[in-house]
Image (cartoon, rainbow, N blue to C red):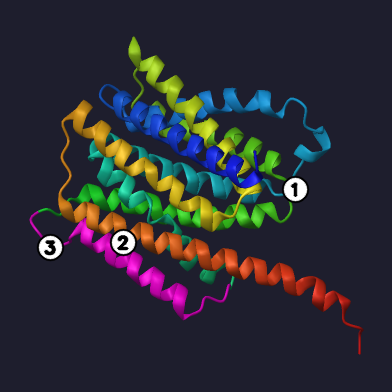
Amino acid sequence: MSNHTRAALLMLASTLAFGVMAIAIRLASQNLHTFEIAFFRNLFGLAAVLPLLRGADPASLRTRQLPRYFVRCAIGVCSMLAGFWAIGHLPLALAISLSYSTPIFVTIAAVIFLREHVRARRWAAVALGFAGVLIIVRPGSADFSTGSLIALLAAVLSGVVAIQIKQLAKVDPANTIVLYTYLFWVPISLVPALFVWEWPHGADWAWLLLAGAFGTAGQVLWTHALKLGDVSALTPISFVQLPILATVGWLWFGETVDVWTWVGAAIILGSNAYIAHREAVLARRAATAAPTAAAKPSE
């Protein structure tokens, strides 16, 4: 099996894992508060990720960036709470459609925090993505819901977190980032959960366990997929999640999605695909130019 095929299958498996996590969160939300769901998702996620680090070199798990990890994880928990609330209280297709706007905000955050230079074509894709968001949210219309703004907040904060991960990755390896992320996520998410605490019962434990296990599996599979394949080729595969969850929402929860949500989602997905394509092209150019520049004699 070629690396491209393996990467595509890993990305598909990651997409399905995140889909199962979303369904489990939705089911758990019927009886539990969002704050508790986030805490247990992180607790079970930590339990799932620790065995994966068993063979890691202890020296590679040390870091000098603990304050930055705390800030990254605090913002990440806020994003998680907003995203989980959206999954639990909005139609699944609507919540997932707005979550796909994250790459738009990653591009903007890269300009602000990393001083990256974004040319006209990527700005055009960002503007197109915003148009898709406005079509879904439709502010000022009778269909406007403040809940959709919470889903949008989750996407904005996820964009900021993605930039912070890029900054951490310049110093620390992936295993270190994963370990400290969960070690901070668990106590940070416990604080708000204590204010609404109610012990889960019966099937709630199963949904929480599934959310933690499949959320962690999705992250691991996604990371391995990107190591093997091109992000511009793999990104469209993640869009498979939308029709699957829309169908689950219709069959299981009796949800309906209007045509404007589909139109807006299609525009956002198209914008994401182009942004991913341009980033991959620029990365390849930079990789090609680096050896050439190194080979030139110094003046």
Residue marked by disc 2: 267
Earlier sequence position, callout 1 versus callout 3: 1
Q: What's the amino acid at mark 1? A: Arg
- Residue 225, given in percent of the width and then of the height, sits at 59, 43
What residue range appears in magenta?
A: 116-142
Left or right: 85, with 59 as reference point: left
Which residue is at 63% across, 51% downward? 68
Task: Name the amino acid type tagged 3.
Answer: Gly
Residue 238 % position (x, y)? 44, 46
**Could you tell me which secondary element the residue under label 1 belongs to?**
loop
**So how many labels did they put on this image?**
3
Compared to 27, does 162 lie above or below? below
Residue assigned mark 3: 140
The reply to whether dot 1 and dot 3 touch (C-beta < 8 Å) is no
Q: Is residue 138 visible?
A: yes
Which corner quadrant of the image does residue 201 belong to?
top left
Distance from the alpha carbon under mark 2 to that under mark 3: 20 Å
